[in-house]
């Protein structure tokens, strides 16, 4: 049972990492009142700067984890995350708050690089696909939980209470993993040849290390953008339902149908199947646009298809990369390109919908889903 408990605690650390984004999003209006002089761009940067750290340093984090080891990396990241949250609970002046968010970005990045690497090492061979799919749910589930519980916490305990609870969560995860996580789950490994630039180029030149990230960026471009923009564009009355149901359907399908399909198909092929299903769902959405319940059903179909892509993308890391070093590098690349997608997807979709409405949304989904299929096919041929 110990490996399974370890996997659950690593997943819990992932929930804490996702909350480093979510707590600011759910407290956005309250933070706007607290930092009224920095509304607009300044407040938006407070949300996004954690992702920008991952965008710039994602693969660097993967390289560093291979040098220092998974255990010290995640323990220090959780301790740093707890300390930063407790500092944020004081609602310090805006420049200090932004510095705390930069440090939080470093904490977040280390957790999302170590998490899948350590889970793949801890899981029994027959359960790796299920374990990686569980890990992949951390972001969507955290946002759903915060959307449900966060407003009540802020009402009852204020922003300070929300940040303090997050800090306690991170510290609790650190304490349990300190006792639970073995030092040899992913030991320090020899540094690669050449400087950081050379090693970055080597990562993205590898059809095994880079492949999970190349498909994942197409997923993050679409998923976060669609969750943000689609509900407000649906038939009046169906938007709030879709906003809650889409992430939950995505997670549920990933953890059930997705896990089962991983026993039948290689993870990369399943990613392609998921993208193909997203294309079909997008076409259905186009034809059913404006038809209420049918339109919402098509939106849920797209979310379910992207849930398959989400889980299978993480499952492909250990399938393609047998060594802990390669897995850490692949997780770093996923963190980097995943943040690229979340940063760029929503503005691009907003532009397309502003110019072409529902057609822009559907073409956006089809284009990036087709690109994901094509990129994986190119990498598959390179690996042959």
Image (tube, helix red, strand yellow):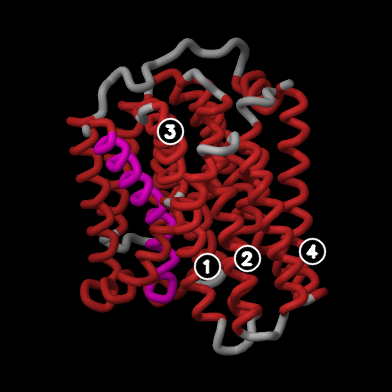
Residue at numbered disc 4: 363
Q: Nearer the viewer, mark 1 or mark 3?
A: 3
* Mark 2 or 4, nearer chain start: 2
Task: Please tell me whether mark 3 sits on a helix, a strand or a loop.
Answer: helix
Residue at numbered disc 2: 226
Residue 11 among those drawn in magenta: yes
Residue 17 among those drawn in magenta: yes
* Mark 3 or 4, nearer chain start: 3
* Mark 1 or 3, nearer chain start: 3
In the image, taking residue 11 as reference, residue 266 lies left or right, namely: right
* Mark 2 or 1, nearer chain start: 2
Could you tell me how far apart the alpha carbons at marks 1 and 3 are, in whole angstroms? 26 Å
What is the crowding at mark 3: few (fewer than 14 residues within 10 Å), some, or many (at least 20)? many
Residue 246: image tag: 1
Task: Please tell me whether mark 4 sits on a helix, a strand or a loop.
Answer: helix
**Span highlighted in magenta in the image:** 4-30
Q: Nearer the viewer, mark 2 or mark 1?
A: 1
**Residue occupying image coordinates x 23% and y 58%:** 164
């Amino acid at each position: 049972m110990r490996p399974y408990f370890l996997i659950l605690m690593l997943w819990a650390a992932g929930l804490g990492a996702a909350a480093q984004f979510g707590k600011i999003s759910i407290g956005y209006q309250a933070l706007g009142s607290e930092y009224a002089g920095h509304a607009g761009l300044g407040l938006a940067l407070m949300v996004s700067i954690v992702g920008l750290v991952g965008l710039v340093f994602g693969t660097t984090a993967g390289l560093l984890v291979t040098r220092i080891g998974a255990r010290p990396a995640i323990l220090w990241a959780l301790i740093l995350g707890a300390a930063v949250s407790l500092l944020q609970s004081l609602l310090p002046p805006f420049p200090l708050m932004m510095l705390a968010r930069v440090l939080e970005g470093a904490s977040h990045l280390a957790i999302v690089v170590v998490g899948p690497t350590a889970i793949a090492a801890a899981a029994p061979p027959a359960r790796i696909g299920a374990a990686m799919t569980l890990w992949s749910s951390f972001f969507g589930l955290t946002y759903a939980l915060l959307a449900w519980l966060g407003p009540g916490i802020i009402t009852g305990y204020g922003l300070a209470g929300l940040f303090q609870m997050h800090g306690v969560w991170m510290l609790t995860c650190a304490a349990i993993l300190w006792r639970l996580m073995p030092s040899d789950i992913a030991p320090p490994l020899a540094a690669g040849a050449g400087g950081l630039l050379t090693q970055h180029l080597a990562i993205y030149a590898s059809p095994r290390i880079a492949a999970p990230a190349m498909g994942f960026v197409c997923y993050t471009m679409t998923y976060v953008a669609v969750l943000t923009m689609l509900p407000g564009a649906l038939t009046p009355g169906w938007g709030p339902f879709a906003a809650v149901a889409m992430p939950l359907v995505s997670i549920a399908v990933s953890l059930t149908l997705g896990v089962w399909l991983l026993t039948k198909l290689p993870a990369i092929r399943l990613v392609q199947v998921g993208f193909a299903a997203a294309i079909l769902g997008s076409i259905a959405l186009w034809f059913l646009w404006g038809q209420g319940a049918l339109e919402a059903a098509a939106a849920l179909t797209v979310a379910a298809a992207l849930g398959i892509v989400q889980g299978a993308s993480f499952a492909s890391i250990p399938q393609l990369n047998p060594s802990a070093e390669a897995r850490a590098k692949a997780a770093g690349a996923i963190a980097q390109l995943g943040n690229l997608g979340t940063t760029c997807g929503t503005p691009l979709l907003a532009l397309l919908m502003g110019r072409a409405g529902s057609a822009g949304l559907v073409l956006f989904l089809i284009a990036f889903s087709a690109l994901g299929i094509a990129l994986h096919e190119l990498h598959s041929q390179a690996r042959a």
